[in-house]
Image (tube, rainbow, N blue to C red):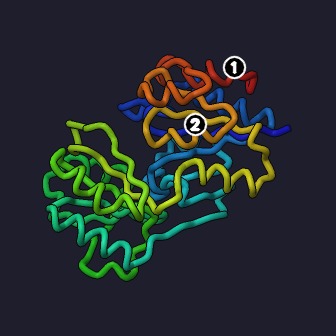
């Protein structure tokens, strides 16, 4: 029976410097050679999953934007876009507090460069996605967005939570001093990486008992709980380790290879 294995990107497939251990590359290829499925499963939008080094590992498909975009062998099997009205309302609410946001879609990332002038995180994104990075105009009529990410100061967190939590899934990430203050992912209600995994399993006819997932942080909690075998990276947060069925070594210490061997997948 084929197994399906889902891999987060940041802190799982690659480390904080976007380095992928050779053991990760070879072990995922062995996994697929044995007839199993390997999927990227990321909070990143599909537009931001474009690293040749990453994609050249060889994956059967991608779950992106916290389960709102799902593809198999290059074919889109599920897509959830936010409506124009939703986007406008969210931006209006965030701007009222002086909060900046990045709009994330399948094809492009959209940002108002004036709001992020001099921001090194935006410079990093421009280099990462290149021609998939577009300027956000006043009119968002033709913008196709799966989710948003916002740059919050500590003082704004409760205000934004109260404003959005009824209608959206809110994922607060730890402060990243090098880039932003606190990163907030704003995702359509009811969606998560687990939902994307469920869509894959339905499409391919894979039973839940044959699912595995690797993750390291807060937006991996649902998928780690959903799959039959949830695996936390050794460099992961404590909450993900508590949720997981198995804790492997850190990404740079061949954690993926060691866990795939532990579960006899390679």
* Residue holding disc 2: 224
Q: Are marks 1 and 2 in contact (CB under 8 Å)?
A: no
Q: Secondary structure at mark 2?
A: helix
Q: Report which quarter residue 207 is drawn in.
A: top right
Left-right relation of 138 to 82: left
Q: Quadrant of the C terminus?
A: top right
Please state the horizontal and vertical placement of residue 52, each as a whole percent of the image: 50, 45
> Which residue is tagged 1?
261
Identity of the residue drawn at 29% across and 82% down = 139
- Of all residues shown, which one is farthest toward the right? 1
Q: Residues within 10 Å of mark 1 (few under 14, many from 20)?
A: few
Q: Is residue 137 above or below residue 45?
A: below
Left or right relative to 266: residue 65: left
The quarter of the rendered structure image containing the N terminus is: top right
Where is residue 228 shown, x and y percent of the image?
69, 35
Q: Nearer the viewer, residue 263 or 194?
A: 194
Q: Residues within 10 Å of mark 2 (few under 14, many from 20)?
A: many
**How far across and down, in percent of the image, does residue 148 sit?**
36, 60
């Amino acid at each position: 029976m084929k197994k399906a294995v889902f891999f987060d990107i940041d802190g799982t497939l690659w480390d904080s410097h976007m380095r992928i251990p050779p053991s990760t590359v070879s072990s995922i290829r062995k996994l697929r050679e044995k007839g199993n499925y390997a999927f990227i499963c990321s909070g990143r939008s599909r537009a931001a999953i474009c690293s040749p080094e990453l994609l050249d590992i060889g994956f059967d498909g991608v779950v992106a934007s916290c389960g709102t975009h799902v593809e198999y062998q290059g074919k889109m099997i599920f897509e959830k876009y936010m409506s124009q009205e939703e986007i406008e309302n969210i931006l209006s609410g965030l701007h009222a507090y002086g909060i900046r946001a990045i709009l994330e879609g399948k094809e492009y990332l959209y940002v108002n460069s004036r709001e992020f002038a001099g921001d090194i995180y935006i410079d990093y994104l421009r280099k990462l996605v290149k021609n998939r990075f577009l300027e956000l105009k006043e009119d968002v009529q033709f913008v196709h967005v799966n989710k948003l990410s916002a740059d919050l100061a500590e003082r704004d967190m409760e205000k934004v939570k109260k404003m959005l939590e009824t209608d959206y899934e809110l994922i607060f990430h730890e402060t990243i001093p090098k880039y932003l203050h606190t990163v907030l992912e704003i995702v359509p209600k009811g969606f998560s990486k687990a939902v994307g995994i469920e869509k894959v399993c339905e499409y391919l006819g894979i039973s839940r008992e044959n699912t595995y997932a690797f993750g390291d942080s807060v937006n991996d909690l649902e998928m780690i709980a959903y799959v039959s075998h949830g695996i936390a990276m050794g460099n992961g947060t404590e909450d993900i380790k508590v949720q997981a069925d198995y804790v492997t070594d850190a990404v740079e210490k061949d954690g993926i290879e060691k866990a795939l061997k532990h579960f006899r997948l390679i």
